[in-house]
Image (cartoon, rainbow, N blue to C red):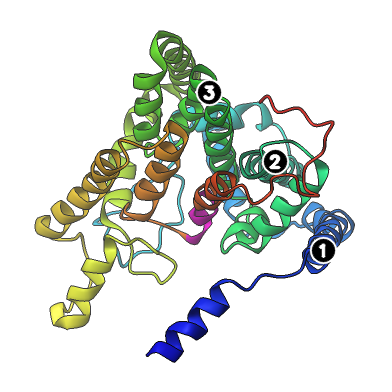
């Protein structure tokens, strides 16, 4: 036992030489540059020329075309249950307002412009991660964060499928980056936009508005009221009033598909593995109540146990709790969790006075 303790003590004091650390940093920088070159030279042209239909962007375009023809945008499932893999449009009316300017485009050009939006959101989130982790802006840190993001499970799939989720990453990233600079009022704006698209950022937005005071509340209210008005104007009252009725059975019951990584749905899977023998149809009220309790309890517990942490930490932890414990948690949602290691790297001072910082970079957000 004494010998083992001596070995562990000796290994804990081991560290790489400064020259080796510099070599690792340079290799990482060059890999990051190669990733950008690969993305611009191959990945972007490949996505630019795609015309296949097996992507999320197809669902958005089909919903926009139904809206243009005056048809019902939302198509609820009959007796929906977690055995059905949802492949229909379930975003709220403000999302349709975002699509509306592209209504006259062909599918090819719609998908190209949409891919450009998603790719821009990818790099905005990477820039936010770099700003949070290193404390400054620099091209090396942004490219490095882009490489890490690209290698994160779910990130590449989200961009390639044209899924909207990278915009949600960017909204959380912009908010946390603003909070790092103690700009609560500014941090509320991207969260308010995110709430217009999905409901789970409402927890983080409520916290930021509570801590940020009147300016944060008024800024968020302006974004929310404007977004709802534009959404209802674009979708029409009939479509807008059908959104929640069509969406709630899908988002509240989870899914047995293996891509659903929800921690709360693990309980439903466990009961099924133990012999429940679920076949089809809606989940029983007991299971739906359990999922609702988990999706509400996780952020509430996070708020309580993180009450002594800085606001940026609380927002990042709330994002993780609301995503991981929602009944539906697809792999594309996971990159948002990178905010937590980014904050840890900042607090640990890992990149202090490193090659990833530039003396000419601004420290303000």
Residue at x 25% of width, y 72% of height? 269
**Disc 1 marks which residue?**
31
Q: Nearer the viewer, residue 3 or 287?
A: 3
Residue 191, given in percent of the width and then of the height, sits at 48, 29
**Disc 3 marks which residue?**
182
Label 1–label 2 contact, CB within 8 A: no
Classify residue 329 by image quadrant: bottom left
Residue 89, given in percent of the width and then of the height, sits at 46, 45
Q: Which residues are magenta?
A: 331-336
Disc 1, SS: helix
Q: Estimate the spatial distance between the alpha carbons at disc 1 and disc 2, rounded to whole Å.
A: 17 Å
Q: Nearer the viewer, residue 321 or 109?
A: 321
> In terms of sequence position, does the residue under pointer 1 or pointer 2 come before the other?
1
Residue at x 61% of width, y 49% of height? 57
**Disc 2 marks which residue?**
127
Question: Which dot, 3 or 2, sits closer to the camera?
Answer: 3
Q: Estimate the spatial distance between the alpha carbons at disc 1 and disc 3, rounded to whole Å.
A: 33 Å
Residue 309, given in percent of the width and then of the height, sits at 38, 37
Q: Is residue 219 above or below residue 307?
A: above
Residue at x 37% of width, y 55% of height? 324
Q: Nearer the viewer, residue 153 or 305?
A: 305
Disc 3, SS: loop
Q: Is residue 152 left or right of residue 256?
A: right
Q: Quadrant of the N terminus?
A: bottom left
Q: Estimate the spatial distance between the alpha carbons at disc 3 and disc 2, rounded to whole Å.
A: 18 Å
> In terms of sequence position, does the residue under pointer 1 or pointer 3 come before the other?
1
Q: Is residue 362 above or below residue 320?
A: above
């Amino acid at each position: 036992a004494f010998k083992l303790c001596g070995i562990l003590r000796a290994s804990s004091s081991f560290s790489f030489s400064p020259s080796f650390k510099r070599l690792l940093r340079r290799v990482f920088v060059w890999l990051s540059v190669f990733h950008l070159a690969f993305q611009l030279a191959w990945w972007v042209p490949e996505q630019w020329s795609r015309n296949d239909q097996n992507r999320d962007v197809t669902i958005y375009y089909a919903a926009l075309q139904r809206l243009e023809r005056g048809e019902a945008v939302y198509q609820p499932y009959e007796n929906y249950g977690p055995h059905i893999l949802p492949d229909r449009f379930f975003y709220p009316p403000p999302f349709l307002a975002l699509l509306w300017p592209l209504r006259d485009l062909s599918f090819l050009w719609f998908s190209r412009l949409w891919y450009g939006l998603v790719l821009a959101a990818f790099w905005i989130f990477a820039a936010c991660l770099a700003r949070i982790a290193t404390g400054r802006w620099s091209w090396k840190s942004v490219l490095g964060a882009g490489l890490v993001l690209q290698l994160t499970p779910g990130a590449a799939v989200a961009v390639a499928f044209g899924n909207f989720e990278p915009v949600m990453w960017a909204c959380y990233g912009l908010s946390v980056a603003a909070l790092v600079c103690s700009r609560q009022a500014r941090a509320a704006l991207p969260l308010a936009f995110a709430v217009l698209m999905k409901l789970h950022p409402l927890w983080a937005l409520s916290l930021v508005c509570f801590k940020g005071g009147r300016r944060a509340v008024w800024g968020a209210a302006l974004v929310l009221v404007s977004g709802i008005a534009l959404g209802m104007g674009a979708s029409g009252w009939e479509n807008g009033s059908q959104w929640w009725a069509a969406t709630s059975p899908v988002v509240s019951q989870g899914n047995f598909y293996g891509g659903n990584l929800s921690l709360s749905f693990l309980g439903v899977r466990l009961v099924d593995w133990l012999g429940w023998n679920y076949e089809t149809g809606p989940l029983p009220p007991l299971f739906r109540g359990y999922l609702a309790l988990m999706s509400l309890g996780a952020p509430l517990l996070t708020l309580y146990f993180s009450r002594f942490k800085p606001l940026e930490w609380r927002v990042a932890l709330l994002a993780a709790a609301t995503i991981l414990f929602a009944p539906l948690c697809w792999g594309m949602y996971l990159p948002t969790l990178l905010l937590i290691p980014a904050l840890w790297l900042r607090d640990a001072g890992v990149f202090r006075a490193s090659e990833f910082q530039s003396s000419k970079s601004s420290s303000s957000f």
